[in-house]
Amino acid sequence: MPDDRTEKASPKRRTTAAEEGQVLRSRDLISTVTLLSVVFVLAFHPEVWIGRWQTYFSRVLESSIHGERSDQSQLFGWTTLAVAQWVIPLFGVAFVMAVASTLAQGGINISPKAFAPKFTRLNPVNNVKQLFSLAVLSRVLKSLLPSAVILYLALNLMLKQAPTILHAARLPARAALALLGHICYSLAWQSGLVLLAWSGVDYILQRQTFEKSLRMTKQEVRRENKDNEGNPQVKGRIRRLRREAMRRSLQKSMERATAVITNPTHYAVALEYRPATMAAPVVVAKGRNLLAQRIKELARWHEVPIVENPPLAQALFKAAEIDQMIPPNLYAAVAEILAFLYRAQMRMQAAARRGAASGAAR
């Protein structure tokens, strides 16, 4: 069957995989970097490393020659000190390099799910199947290639040093040990470089395999987008409910409005002012563009006066929020407009009363 996992892994898919313990990690690269770091540390001032053991053996032999019966605890302390002087620096460098190479490959990932007990791992049948699986066979075959290269390097080095090795018995002990150390160091760093190159190739192959294992089908991508963004039908219903709620709220606010200040097309701010109960006008609604047009429609429906004053409309829109009083620096401009509207309303009421009186007199 054709593989339908053609989409790249999403960030959520990668996070889920990391929580389950699926991370890109090349153990060969970590061990190779650690091995090379230890080899180069030992090669740096080798007389220091050799001198520590010389000091230890000299102290022990000198104590034996002079017939001193060293306390067992004292001998144990010398041995512990000599071993610690060797082991602690090497372990420290190895630990630092292992952590650094791990961080370079994506950091340290602690997954509780990966530590969860799985009883299928205790099944001997499954373990035997995995032991003779194609994956294990492929890893064994891949490990044979760098092993063959290292074996070739070792044979080549031995052939080059064969004349010297044959006459090593005639050399002084110090020179023989120096020759042995030189051969071991040459083989170690050459083998380390081979393993480093091979681990780099292995990391690239593992990265391709890892990315392929995280691929998603188009159905999974759609399902994840739906989970992240929500069902489109539900979102549409939520938007409709919000619009209806805003429409009802705007309707109630415009019923309280005393005047509407407009830009005239881009801004609209509805104000409420009741001199008996309010210290200053309050913004009951405001909007831009389509919402401004809606405010003006409701203002005409409720017979709320509309006044065009672009500077004041923009200032009120930016300086005051809904259900808040206007800032003091706009009191004078708003009061002038409200006073004008109040006088106009009084004139209209007076004209209406005169018209009603003249009609009654006839």
Image: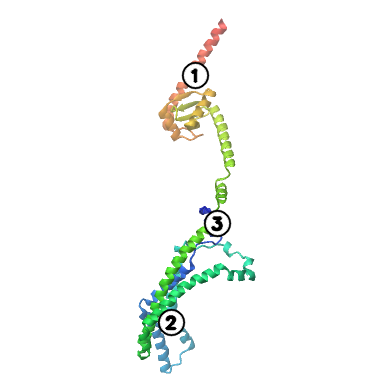
Q: Quadrant of residue 49?
A: bottom left
Asked whether the residues under the numbered discs 1 and 3 touch, taking CB atoms below 8 Å apart as contact, a structural biologist would say no
Residue type at numbered disc 2: Ala
**Alpha-carbon neighbours of circle 1 within 10 Å: few (<14), some, or many (≥20)?**
few
Locate residue 306 relative to residue 174 in the image: left or right.
right
Asked whether the residues under the numbered discs 1 and 2 touch, taking CB atoms below 8 Å apart as contact, a structural biologist would say no
Q: Position of residue 207 (x, y in %)?
A: 48, 61
Of the pair 67 and 207, the residue shown nearer to us:
207
Of the pair 254 and 243, the residue shown nearer to us:
243
Residue type at numbered disc 3: Thr
Callout 2: helix, strand or loop?
helix
Residue under numbered circle 2: 82
Closer to the chain start, of discs 1 and 2, is 2
Q: Quadrant of residue 90?
A: bottom left
Residue under numbered circle 1: 345
Q: Position of residue 117 (x, y in %)?
A: 62, 65
What is the C-alpha distance between the residues marked 1 and 2?
105 Å
User: Can I make out residue 283 in this image?
Assistant: no
Q: Quadrant of the C terminus?
A: top right
Q: Is residue 217 above or below residue 94?
A: above
What is the C-alpha distance between the residues marked 1 and 3?
68 Å
Callout 3: helix, strand or loop?
helix
User: Residue shown at 59%/38% (left/top)?
Assistant: 237
Closer to the chain start, of discs 1 and 3, is 3
Q: Is residue 310 above or below residue 155?
A: above
Q: Position of residue 130 (x, y in %)?
A: 59, 69
Residue type at numbered disc 1: Gln
Asked whether the residues under the numbered discs 3 and 2 touch, taking CB atoms below 8 Å apart as contact, a structural biologist would say no
Residue under numbered circle 3: 16
Q: Position of residue 170 (x, y in %)?
A: 35, 91
